[in-house]
């Protein structure tokens, strides 16, 4: 499908074998798309917002509580979602007391998956399917391993998810507001690929742009922009001020090409939205 937003066609200039992208407005209408939006791509860490949404469904269903113990001693579900549990990036090792540092942690999301699976008495991948994917019609999406990084999906499916986050049906809007608001403000930490950030703000499973520099979104992105990018060359951002979300999936790992290409792409998308 050719996009009604000219900026989306610029993904053809990215140095990647294959790319697809789309923009969905807060009212759920598709502003435009480009590339093979039905192709399945590994999401890498764009898996985390999907997993977090399932955790929040479990919270609203009463299976878990956000402030109950989970992960290392002294940590809670909320700490794990916000990368403040103290767990290391990719090993089951405690590096800080809960709530004192923002340590981006795949291990923390794996602990979340285990916690929900135990509470619900079903594997986390199945809980994600039943709680989020199936209700949203995300039939091309599956979790094939770690809830931190092993989902596979399409642009078309992630558009459905981005529409849900902007106008929630599966969750109370107040829960989503909490997820897109800073949890444990003021903590510093490393944003993978972009270095040390002061502060390194996160919500519940979503990274929050605020005033971070450098950043993978655009110079014109609002500070309230939230989302995630993945090391497989993928991203999803939602800009509440622009009342829109953008998904881009590629088959080239994140690297210098993405650092260079993504921010001007985002600024061009936002400019198109203002004039559409």
Image (tube, helix red, strand yellow):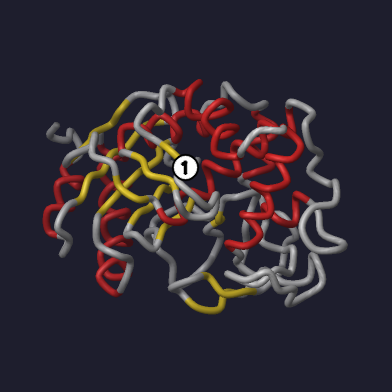
Q: Residue at x 39, y 50 (%)?
A: 43
Residue 109 in the image: above or below residue 100: above
Q: Residue at x 74, y 63 (%)?
A: 85
Which quarter of the picture shows residue 262?
bottom left
Residue 234: x, y in percent? 35, 54
Which of these two is toward me, 218 or 201?
A: 201
Residue 74 in the image: above or below residue 150: below
Q: Residue at x 49, y 71 (%)?
A: 192
Which of these two is toward me, 73 or 23?
A: 73
Left or right of 152 in this view: 61 = right
Quadrant location, the N terminus? top left
Residue 20: x, y in percent? 22, 45
Local packing at callout 1 (Cα closer than 10 Å; few below 14, some 14-19, many 20+) is: many
Q: Is residue 220 visible?
A: yes
- Local SS, label 1: strand
Q: Residue at x 61, y 38 (%)?
A: 123
Left or right of 114 in this view: 269 = left
Which of these two is toward me, 73 or 257?
A: 73
Residue 52: x, y in percent? 60, 44
Which quarter of the picture shows residue 65?
top right
Quadrant location, the C terminus? top left
Residue 196: x, y in percent? 55, 78
Q: How many marks?
A: 1
Which quarter of the picture shows residue 105?
bottom right
User: Label 1 belongs to which residue?
Assistant: 143
Q: Is residue 225 visible?
A: no
């Amino acid at each position: 499908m050719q996009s009604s937003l000219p900026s989306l066609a610029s993904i053809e200039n990215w140095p990647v074998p294959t790319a697809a992208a789309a923009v969905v407005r807060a009212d759920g209408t598709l502003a435009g798309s480009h590339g093979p939006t039905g192709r399945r791509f590994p999401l890498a860490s764009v898996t985390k917002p999907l997993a977090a949404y399932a955790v929040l469904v479990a919270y609203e269903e009463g299976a878990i509580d956000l402030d109950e113990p989970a992960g290392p001693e002294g940590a809670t579900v909320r700490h794990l979602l916000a990368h403040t549990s103290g767990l290391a990036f990719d090993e089951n090792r405690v590096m800080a007391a809960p709530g004192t540092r923002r340590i981006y942690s795949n291990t923390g999301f794996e602990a979340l998956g285990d916690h929900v699976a135990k509470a619900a008495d079903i594997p986390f991948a199945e809980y994600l399917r039943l709680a989020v994917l199936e209700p949203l019609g995300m039939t091309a999406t599956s979790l094939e391993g770690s809830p931190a990084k092993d989902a596979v999906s399409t642009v078309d499916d992630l558009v459905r998810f981005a529409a849900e986050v902007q106008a929630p049906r599966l969750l109370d809007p107040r829960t989503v507001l909490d997820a897109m608001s800073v949890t444990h403000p003021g903590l510093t930490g490393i944003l993978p690929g972009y270095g040390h950030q002061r502060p390194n703000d996160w919500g519940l499973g979503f990274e929050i742009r605020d005033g971070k520099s450098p950043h993978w979104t655009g110079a014109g992105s609002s500070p309230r922009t939230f989302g995630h990018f993945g090391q497989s060359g993928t991203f999803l951002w939602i800009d509440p001020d622009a009342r829109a979300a953008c998904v881009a999936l590629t088959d080239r790992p994140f690297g210098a090409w993405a650092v260079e290409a993504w921010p001007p792409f985002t600024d061009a998308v936002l400019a198109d939205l203002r004039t559409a």
